[in-house]
Amino acid sequence: MSDARTLTGLLRRDRLLVAPGVYDGLSAAVASRAGVEAAYVSGAAVSAGEGLPDIGLTTVTEIARAISVVRRHLDVPVIADADTGFGDETNTFRTVRTYEDAGAAAVQLEDQVFPKRCGHLDDKALISADEFVLKIGAALAARRRGTLIVARTDAIAVEGFDAAIARAQRYAAAGADVIFVEAPQTPEEVAAIPSAIGVPVIFNVVPGGKSPEVSREQLQEFGYAGAILPGATVGAAFDAMTRAMSDIAAGSLGSGPVTSPRTLFEAVGLDAWAARRAPKEPARA
């Protein structure tokens, strides 16, 4: 079964699909060892990993490379963030083809202008719904392996909740397989979204962001098909690195539990690589 078909099944079952964010080989290896069912290659996380803010500075090739690296370790469906498609509908067509070749099972597009901003930052701006429908059409025409197209709208912050729902409904009617309404601002808005849309809907879990805190059980009760957690690994890595560097700057040579080299390398496949080496013949007397 293809990854896209597997992902479709996961999104259409009764249980909420949770896809943690990954952005490099190490985060993917950790996710694989944890037994995740799907993963989300976050543009924000890839940007942060490149030492850049999530304001449209990363390129299609940088994120496609991240997808390829992630797929070395993860044999589960990957949803990949494609921002605005990196241009107009022609660029969107190429982006979907590039992401497919890298191993994405789903490609997420959003209706912001380029350069975009993180959905939980201020000062966002949108293209028209007509323009975004053209991008959805280009994405649908580009796919060759049943790749799912996720359509995200950032309209709540710009045009209000009702306008966001109207856009989401139009994107679903245009053929998007999954809808993503970014940054609902109240529990009531979070609860109202799935029932207003005719296709599976996912929710973006961003601690400290613009949306209220909700539980896994609540999202399932509201009717969401899935939840993405973009900062699950990059945020944890940032916090741990900050503590470690603060300790070192304060005069320590490192404190707290530290992973041994063997444990770290085993997580990224040391034993499998070692098994590929030809056994050495014993030296002759």
Image (cartoon, rainbow, N blue to C red):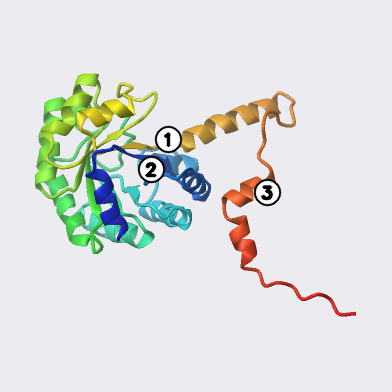
- For disc 1, the marked residue is 231
Question: Mark 1 or 2 closer to N-term?
Answer: 2
- Label 2, secondary structure: give it: loop
- Label 1, secondary structure: give it: loop
- For disc 2, the marked residue is 42
Question: Which residue type does callout 2 highlight?
Answer: Ser
The one of 40 and 112 positioned closer to us in this rendering? 40
- Position of residue 115 in the picture relative to residue 207 (left or right): left
- Position of residue 232 in the picture relative to residue 1 (left or right): right
The one of 209 and 12 positioned closer to us in this rendering? 12
The one of 246 and 218 positioned closer to us in this rendering? 218
Distance, label 1 to label 2, CA atoms, is 8 Å
The one of 284 and 110 positioned closer to us in this rendering? 284
Q: Are marks 1 and 2 in contact (CB under 8 Å)?
A: yes
Dot 1, crowdedness within 10 Å: few (<14), some or many (≥20)? many
Distance, label 2 to label 3, CA atoms, is 28 Å
* Circle 3 or circle 1, nearest the eye: 3
**Res 198 quadrant in image:** top left
Q: Quadrant of the C terminus?
A: bottom right
Distance, label 3 to label 1, CA atoms, is 26 Å
Q: Are marks 2 and 3 in contact (CB under 8 Å)?
A: no
Question: Mark 3 or 1 closer to N-term?
Answer: 1
Dot 2, crowdedness within 10 Å: few (<14), some or many (≥20)? many
- For disc 3, the marked residue is 262
Residue 45 placement (x, y as % from top left): 43, 40
Q: Is residue 181 above or below residue 208?
A: below
Residue 108 placement (x, y as % from top left): 27, 46
Please name the residue shown 38% across and 43% down the image: 43
Q: Are marks 3 and 1 in contact (CB under 8 Å)?
A: no
